[in-house]
Image: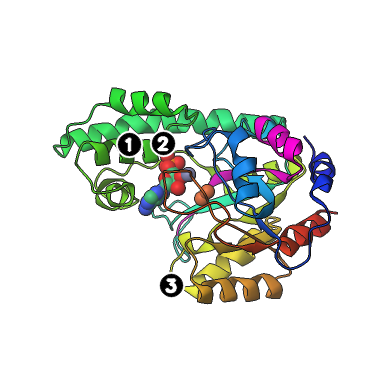
Amino acid sequence: MTAQHAQEAGEGAGSPGASGWFCDLHVHSTASDGTTLPQDLPKLARAAGLAAMALTDHDTTDGLPACAAAAARIGLTFVPGIEISADPGPPPGRPATSPMRLGTLHILGLFVAAGDAKLRQIRQRMRAARNSRNPAIVEKLNALGVGIDYAEVLDLARAEGTQIIGRPHIAEVLMRRGYADSVTDAFARYLRQGAPAYVRRDRLAANDAIDAIHHAGGLAVMAHPVQLVAGDRDQLEQHVRRLKDSGLDGIETRHSDHTPQEVDFFEDLAKRYGLGTSGGSDFHGSRKSVALGSQRVPFTVFEGLVERRA
Ligand code: AMP
Ligand code: ZN
Ligand code: FE
Ligand code: FE
């Protein structure tokens, strides 16, 4: 479904835009590592008081047709999206060959064509990258004395109907088996970058992720910038400038990980660099504690992105 169709589908919702209308432009489904089926999201969005939602699964557009159709049935405005994991590169001052890495760099593609060939290539490459990395994580865990089996991870993913198997599933198994108190705790103890069972996987270069999103007709938006560099605003600004030079269209200013002060800072940063703004909850169903629509992103944010795209 094209964005134009998506907008047409949304016309049944009346004419949102007045205050009191909200959107959520960062949502996951079982097509990646969320726990809600893509076709079940639109009615949850409507119940949460939203006029528009984007589906932005990790490295895949597989959930878009089902979600778009369900949104059209109830007259909810739908934005087809994706969230691509990119290589954050080494910290400033380090050579390009340095193995050191900053935090997480995720690039949202909003208004993308679901069937785009480049996005499908990315899906294949990232699936292979996770599938070869996951067993390596379990091997490291085993070496640390954590007695889980990769088959348990596969069983859990199968039971949930998840299409992309990644660290959240390993975290869930660790929690269920009593090796961690929660998914977050499992990441902190074992799985996050720098933790003892972390294994780096293949990632796209940021400019390739941005180019693929543009190829698919979408806007490239830097997701949750706070996850790239926490606490160092100069470094973050340097990265935003670099991404802007690679064609970045916007910044996700409102996100569940951002404090109100950070939202203000990112809004100001976007303005200074002529970038658009987006926002969303990063809903993952029952996997994370954030609720769909919880960022109360004004509908005008969606409208601003539509305008920028035009
Ligand atoms: P993967 O792509 O398999 O490496 O896993 C990345 C996923 O793990 C993303 O969906 C994140 O939402 C989730 N994730 C990353 N870091 C954390 C963390 N510290 N706590 C909970 N979930 C996390
Ligand atoms: Zn996720
Ligand atoms: Fe993300
Ligand atoms: Fe996300």
Asked if one can make out residue 2 in the rendered structure from this viewpoint, the answer is yes
Q: Do the residues labelled 1 and 2 touch (CB within 8 Å)?
A: yes
Residue type marked 3 = Gly
Give 199 or 219, whichever is nearer the viewer: 219
- Residue 166, numbered label: 2
Residue 284 lies, with reference to residue 163, above or below; the image says below
Q: Where is residue 225 in the image (x, y as percent from the top left)?
A: 53, 62
Q: Are marks 1 and 3 in contact (CB under 8 Å)?
A: no
Q: Mark 1 highlights which residue? A: 170
Q: Report, in whole angstroms, how far the alpha carbon at label 2 lies from the one at label 3.
A: 27 Å
| Residue at the farthest left position | 145
Q: Residue at x 67, y 70 (%)?
A: 270
Q: Does the magenta stretch include residue 74?
A: yes
Q: What stretch is highlighted in magenta?
A: 66-90
User: What secondary structure is marked by label 2?
Assistant: loop
How many numbered circles does the render carry?
3
Which comes sooner in the sequence, label 2 or label 3? 2
Q: Where is residue 289 in the image (x, y as percent from the top left)?
A: 42, 52
Residue type marked 2 = Gly
